[in-house]
Image (tube, helix red, strand yellow):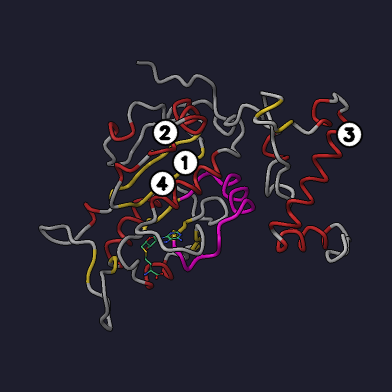
């Protein structure tokens, strides 16, 4: 098997690097390890959950090509004693278990090896329902970094001291509670990786889609032209690109106004429109 990538990643100089981590290489298969490719290091008790759905379709192909890389770091070996305990009961009592500061710290220090200390170049993130809600702007910011480290919590979460000590950014997938951070990590990595150059076939599609310009996307249609008595809006079949563009824009604004008054308000303000009447 050759380690040469099928096509070079944008940020890389196309050089393969020697992996210094203790991570068993076979965990991620024989994917090319490209120096300079955007990388996600994931601290998790379930490293086998990765790449998960990220191994499919466009993100999977890009992973195989070395356009980005994934480095799951198993939290368990950093555990204490014969049983490699990673958690303990909450101080002050209450239900459940909390991931220990010393154990998580050891994993974070391992993850920090070989990464830039600047949080701009390399964000360090704890997936948490208490965090700032993840959005497209966050994905864009992360895609501009060299990579990031994500800490997936389990049980009741993580000892607060280790979060403070490592200047960790808390980010939430939404206002609901998951059993662990892994699904949130995969969702956020997916949104970030698809913004890396070369990952999507059609680069323009990230400029016009929902949330990229503050609006939701217009409805999409494809064949058959007539389905169950429902026709495709005529303008889309007219071949008049000016009109099509205008229709899409109007639909986009209408959908946003109806479904997401919060987004519409921000958009209208930025455009100098009156959000109540427009
Ligand atoms: N007791 C915590 C919830 C713990 S849920 C609280 O009430 O805030 C267990 C783990 O799942 C968390 O440590 C976190 O890593 C992950 N998680 C749960 N909900 C999440 C969400 N909405 N976004 C991101 N991560 C989440």
Side of 50 relative to 4 (left or right): left
Helix, strand or loop at label 1? It is: strand
Within-10-Å neighbours for mark 4: few <14, some 14–19, many 20+: some
Q: Which corner quadrant holds the N terminus? A: top left
- The residue carrying mark 3 is 243
**Vertically, is 88 above or below 242?**
below
Question: First in sequence: mark 4 or mark 3?
Answer: 4
Question: Within the magenta stretch, is there residue 135?
Answer: yes
- The residue carrying mark 4 is 41
Q: Are marks 4 and 1 in contact (CB under 8 Å)?
A: yes
Within-10-Å neighbours for mark 1: few <14, some 14–19, many 20+: many
Within-10-Å neighbours for mark 2: few <14, some 14–19, many 20+: some
Q: Position of residue 125 (x, y in %)?
A: 47, 57
Q: Nearer the viewer, mark 3 or mark 1?
A: 3
Residue at (34% x, 70% y) in the render? 159
Question: First in sequence: mark 2 or mark 1?
Answer: 1
- The residue carrying mark 2 is 55
Q: Nearer the viewer, mark 3 or mark 2?
A: 3
Q: Which corner quadrant holds the C terminus? A: bottom right
Question: Within the magenta stretch, is there residue 213?
Answer: no
Q: Position of residue 20 (x, y in %)?
A: 33, 38
- Stretch in magenta: 128-148
Q: Position of residue 50 (x, y in %)?
A: 36, 41
Number of numbered discs visible in the structure rendering: 4
Label 2 – label 1 distance at C-alpha: 14 Å
Q: Nearer the viewer, mark 4 or mark 3?
A: 3
- The residue carrying mark 1 is 39
Residue at (78% x, 33% y) in the render? 233
């Amino acid at each position: 098997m050759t380690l040469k990538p099928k096509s070079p990643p944008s940020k890389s100089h196309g050089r393969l690097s020697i992996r210094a981590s203790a991570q068993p290489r076979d965990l991620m298969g024989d994917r090319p390890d490209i120096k300079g490719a955007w990388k996600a290091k994931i601290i998790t008790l379930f490293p086998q959950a990765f790449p998960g759905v990220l191994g499919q379709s466009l993100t999977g192909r890009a992973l195989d090509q070395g356009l980005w890389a994934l480095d799951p770091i198993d939290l368990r070996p950093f555990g204490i004693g014969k049983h490699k305990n990673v958690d303990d009961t909450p101080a002050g009592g209450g239900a459940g278990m909390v991931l220990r500061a010393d154990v998580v710290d050891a994993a974070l220090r391992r993850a920090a090896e070989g990464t830039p200390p600047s949080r701009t170049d390399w964000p360090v993130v704890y997936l948490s329902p208490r965090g700032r809600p993840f959005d497209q702007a966050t994905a864009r910011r992360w895609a501009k970094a060299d990579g990031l480290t994500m800490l997936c919590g389990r049980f009741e979460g993580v000892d607060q001291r280790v979060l403070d000590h490592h200047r960790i950014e808390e980010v939430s997938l939404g206002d609901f509670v998951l059993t662990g951070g892994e699904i949130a990590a995969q969702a956020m990595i997916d949104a970030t990786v698809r913004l890396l150059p070369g990952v999507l076939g059609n680069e323009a599609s990230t400029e016009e889609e929902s949330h990229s310009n503050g609006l939701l996307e217009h409805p999409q249609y494809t064949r058959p032209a007539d389905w169950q008595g429902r026709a495709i809006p005529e303008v889309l079949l007219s071949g008049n690109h000016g009109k099509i563009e205008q229709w899409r824009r109007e639909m986009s604004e209408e959908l946003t106004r109806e479904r997401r008054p919060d987004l519409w308000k921000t958009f209208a303000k930025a455009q100098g429109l009156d959000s109540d009447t427009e």
